[in-house]
Amino acid sequence: MQNTLPSDTLLMQNTHPSDTLCVHDDPVIAKKVQYYTEWLTKDAERNRLVNSFKRIGEYEYIATEPTFVNGQEIITFAPFQQKLSAMQTTTPKQTLLLWMIFAIYLLSLAFYGVTGLEAILALTNTFYLIDVLIYFLVSIRLFNQSNEEQVDNAVIHLLAHADWPTYTILCPLYRETEVVSQFAKAMKALDYPVDKLQILFLTEADDDLTREAIKALRLPSHFKIITVPDGQPRTKPRACNYGLLEARGSYVVIFDAEDIPDPLQLKKAVLAFANAGPQTACVQAKLNFYNAEQNLLTRWFTAEYSTWFDMTLPGLQALNVPLPLGGTSNHFRTDVLREVGAWDPFNVTEDCDLGLRLGRLGMKTVMLNSTTLEEANPDAKNWMRQRSRWIKGYICRRIWCICAIPWNTSAKDAYASFFPFNSSLVARPQFCSSTH
């Protein structure tokens, strides 16, 4: 991977008015422009209905209600779904099952010694073999035809004066004074009507330095600093839940403070919703790194992300299974995000969790051929802490998945989607979502 902006971005920057006029003469492009224009008009009417002040007020009332768990008051800023929350990692039945598996493991070692250990290792390797086989088959399928959403830059330029929906960008950050100027620059570079944008910096109550750094930039009025009330757990998903209460956009996306998204990404995401159908709840953009050449660790990280976002996730989409979302650059319909209860503040991989919940409710996530560049972790010690958190979250979600069958579909479809997804979830915990 070269350390440059996405090719789509370069194409956009090199497009001249004469090129646009030539493309406009193409009947295929003209037909797409007409379709998108009509769809945006219908979508605006839909958004006015589902994002009425009454509905938003009802959600805010429920989301800010305190919840008592084991005698302790918590405010998650979202409808708290205790049965689906990582606050309780396992149910009593799951705990019993895990103890039974552990007991079988000890008994096999006691009675069969090395033979029992070999059997356990063979079973473990079987999971990896299944994962490699699925990954290989998915890769072959993608070589023939990619199913990720493609939106032509030429079409977007011809829709410059269309009725684009309002968009909220959530940026949760904590003690990140050194990157706020870079983030502000990346947000100013977005090709989207400023009067339709709301960019929220989500800061923690004790993070005065970051707030001062943002104020020093003297940003336009569509940038706003939000202070998340102090409380537990102090996590990224809790901050995002609070940001959702302030969101006034019909669509919402999360960007981390170091992110540099494709300038056309917001428009591409909206049109991806138009292409993917009404069951689509989320559009996930690709992630990669702008410091790929910094050291060996960042090179490995880049190779991993390229595989995960360019092949594995599109492959899972082709298999029609739920996608574990990335922690950034996932675009939602705001009303749908409220409907599913937003993020679980107790989950350390809230992105993966939300992707699973969307699938469990029969909603769809699609991949978008647009890239956000971020910073790969170059320090081995920080990388180890980060990766340990991801694996912990994926193990918790793997245990939760046992209860997720039969999903919200027929039993046949449920099991068909369960095994491909979970083999990848078990055998590739290192391919977790993006940086938190």
Image (cartoon, grey):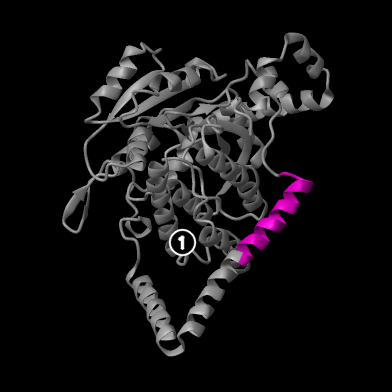
* Residue drawn at the location 55% of the way across and 19% of the way down: 192
Residue 141 lies in the magenta stretch: yes
Front residue of 32 and 216: 216
* Residue drawn at the location 42% of the way across and 83% of the way down: 109
Query: Split into 4 quadrants, where in the image is the C terminus?
Result: top left
Identify the magenta region. 129-146
Front residue of 157 and 279: 157
Query: Split into 4 quadrants, where in the image is the N terminus?
Result: top right
Residue 246 percent coordinates (x, y)? 35, 30
Question: In the rendered view, does 405 fall on the left or right side of 73?
Answer: right
Q: Main secondary structure of the magenta part?
A: helix
Residue 14 percent coordinates (x, y)? 70, 15
Front residue of 27 and 390: 390
* Residue drawn at the location 36% of the way across and 26% of the way down: 201
Crowding at label 1, few (<14), some or many (≥20) Cα neighbours within 10 Å?
A: some
Residue 346 percent coordinates (x, y)? 32, 50
Label count reads 1
